Image (cartoon, rainbow, N blue to C red):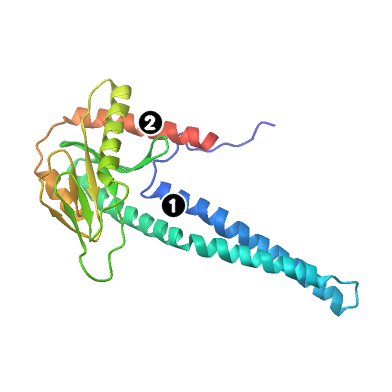
Amino acid sequence: MKPKTRSPLKDKPLRTPGQSVAEEREELLENTVSQPLMLALFLMLLAGLEWYRLYFNVTPSPIIFSIGAGFGIAYAVFRIYRNLPRLRSLRQAIEGEKVVGQFLERLRQDGFHVFHDVVGDGFNVDHVLIGPPGVFTVETKTWSKPASGNAEVVFDGQTLKIGSFSPDRDPIVQAKAQASWLKQLLLQSTGRTFEARPVIVFPGWFVANSGGFRDLWVLEPKALPSFLQNEPARLSPEDVKLASFHLSRLIRATERERSLN
């Protein structure tokens, strides 16, 4: 049957800061908290029904259902407890991306186009900036700080050290791969080469740079505007509009495909 109404919106809205992480957290909550909890509540209801039958002299079988409810509760507690650290980590990541995203929104007054949560094939770019100095991918790392001791990020131009440890997954490789992907994406869409510079920001951390800022910036978010201001203008207003238009179109096309799956 053909629907009698339709949405007045022609296009899907652009994505918000931290949307991919929020979607991952919602899925984790659904799979590891909601489902086991509903199972436990259902089994508790069955057990309660059997005790009700016992109390009112209806042929009961409460022991079997009580055992089942006990297993259901134990399973729910296990699943929830095991995934609490991941849920906390995702919540922290969402908050970090929102804070950085809101901070980056201020750059619009300086002629930048700001995009959030640009989804690729199995990954996402937290933020993209397109303005007179060029195209920038921004990866947000909202990592917990130690309760005491060294709480700084050290970048020597090639490697990162976070406090007293080095990360297992190299954010530098990740950030450079994202910039390369965006460059190729814009090339395929516009027929023009837009160099994309990767940026990694660490909200709430002190960042010590000892290796310069050649092809990658590692910064505190509040330092990014001054770095951008010190960059020469590489893109004309027309180039900025061209790259932004094509990226907006690609984002919306991706959202349409995702909504159909």
- Amino acid bearing label 1: Ala
- The outermost residue toward the top is 191
- Amino acid bearing label 2: Leu
| Frontmost residue, 175 versus 132 | 175
In this image, 54 relative to 201: left or right? right
* Image coords of residue 195 (percent x, y): 20, 30
Q: Report which residue position mark 1 lands on.
A: 22
Q: Is residue 128 visible?
A: no
Q: Report which residue position mark 2 lands on.
A: 250
* Image coords of residue 139 (percent x, y): 28, 46
Task: Give the quadrant of the N terminus.
Answer: top right
Residue density around tag 2, few if under 14, some if 14–19, many if 20 or more, within 10 Å: some
In this image, 77 relative to 155: left or right? right
Quarter location, residue 40: bottom right
Residue density around tag 1, few if under 14, some if 14–19, many if 20 or more, within 10 Å: some
The CA distance from mark 2 to mark 1 is 21 Å
The residue that appears at 86% across and 76% down in the rendered structure is 54
